[in-house]
């Protein structure tokens, strides 16, 4: 597989769009090729730059996609444009549609028990043919490996891991060797969105690339996390200058 990549602050992103990426995942489900996907936003890129263990973890992924307009803009500044953002949320929705069409087996790991239950109910109602073979909340003892054993024995086609960063990527990287097949993807707050706990920005805000601003207004506690953004932009210009030399 030779997919063009764009490297941003050491993180290799696949050069693709939402539709092609989901088709690629579909082919890999059909051919039972085990796949680790990281959906990386500027926060993840910055975390990986500060923590070499986390960088090593995400580099184990088969694909790192540009989740967020910040990464797409960064690629443009570096004169290596990416076609568009490929978000965790849209990828999960596309995978659920595929699962509904093809009766794929799904496992959900993460979030609080009541959020997880609501997310499972929502999927069962909206995607009735998607086959949820198991689920576990995201508050468990890390050394309690029964979850990975359960996933290995259930052989799901899709495993959605919502443990927040960096734990979701760490969990996948730590256990993937034990699985035979399946798409493993860290999905952050997607179960909360499915459960209706966190509303996604209205489409117009998304089209205007202002989803981050909508989130900030709705969840002001996120502002601290956004402080990484100016630092991210500075580092991108730093990479650009270095690239010219
Ligand atoms: N989460 C979890 N276990 C943990 C920490 C977080 O299951 O130990 C879940 C949390 O309940 C939420 C999701 O991970 O459903 C995303 O959490 P957060 O918004 O903190 O993560 P981020 O936005 O950084 O991915």
Image (spheres, helix red, strand yellow):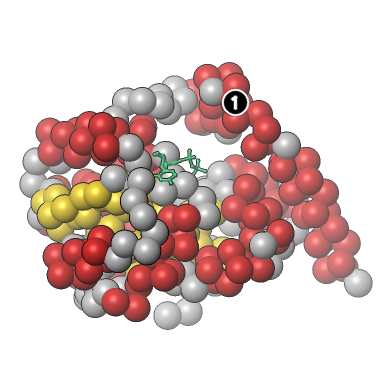
Q: Where the C terminus falls, by quadrant?
A: bottom right
Counting from the top left corner in percent of width and height, residue 30 is at 20, 70
Q: Quadrant of residue 89?
A: top left
Q: Quadrant of residue 194?
A: top left
Residue at point 65%, 37% (across, down): 225
Badge 1 is on which residue? 221
Give the vertical position of 176 relative to 26 (above or below): below
State which image quarter holds ligand 1: top left
Whether the residue under disc 1 has CB within 8 Å of ligand 1 = no
Counting from the top left corner in percent of width and height, residue 83 is at 55, 54
Q: Quadrant of residue 186?
A: bottom left
User: How many labels were placed on the picture?
Assistant: 1
Would you say residue 39 is visible in this rendering?
Answer: yes
Residue at point 41%, 70% (across, down): 174
Counting from the top left corner in percent of width and height, residue 14 is at 52, 65
Would you say residue 16 is visible in this rendering?
Answer: no
Q: Is residue 68 left or right of residue 48?
A: left
Q: Secondary structure at mark 1?
A: helix
Of residues 95 and 218, the one drawn nearer to the viewer in this rendering: 218
Give the vertical position of 149 relative to 110 (above or below): below
Residue at point 40%, 26% (across, down): 198
Of residues 78 and 180, the one drawn nearer to the viewer in this rendering: 180
Q: Is residue 200 left or right of residue 220?
A: left
């Amino acid at each position: 597989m030779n997919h063009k990549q764009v490297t941003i602050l050491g993180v290799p992103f696949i050069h693709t769009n939402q539709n092609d990426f989901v088709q690629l995942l579909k082919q890999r489900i059909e051919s039972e090729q085990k796949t680790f996907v990281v959906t990386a936003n500027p926060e993840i890129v910055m975390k990986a730059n500060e923590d070499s263990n986390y960088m090593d973890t995400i580099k184990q992924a088969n694909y790192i996609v540009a989740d967020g307009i910040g990464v797409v803009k960064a690629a443009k500044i570096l004169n290596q444009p990416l076609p568009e953002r490929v978000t965790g949320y849209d990828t999960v929705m596309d995978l659920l549609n595929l699962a509904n069409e093809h009766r794929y087996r799904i496992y959900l790991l993460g979030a609080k028990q009541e959020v997880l239950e609501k997310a499972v109910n929502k999927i069962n109602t909206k995607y009735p043919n998607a086959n949820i073979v198991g689920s576990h909340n995201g508050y468990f003892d890390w050394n309690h490996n029964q979850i990975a054993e359960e996933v290995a024995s259930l052989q799901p086609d899709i495993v959605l891991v919502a443990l927040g960063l960096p734990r979701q990527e760490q969990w996948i990287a730590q256990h993937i060797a034990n699985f035979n097949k399946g798409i493993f993807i860290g999905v952050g707050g997607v179960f909360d969105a499915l459960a209706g706990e966190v509303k996604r920005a209205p489409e117009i805000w998304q089209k205007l690339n202002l989803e981050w601003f909508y989130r900030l207004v709705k969840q002001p506690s996120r502002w601290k996390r956004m402080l990484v953004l100016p630092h991210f932009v500075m580092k991108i210009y730093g990479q650009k200058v270095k690239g010219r030399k």
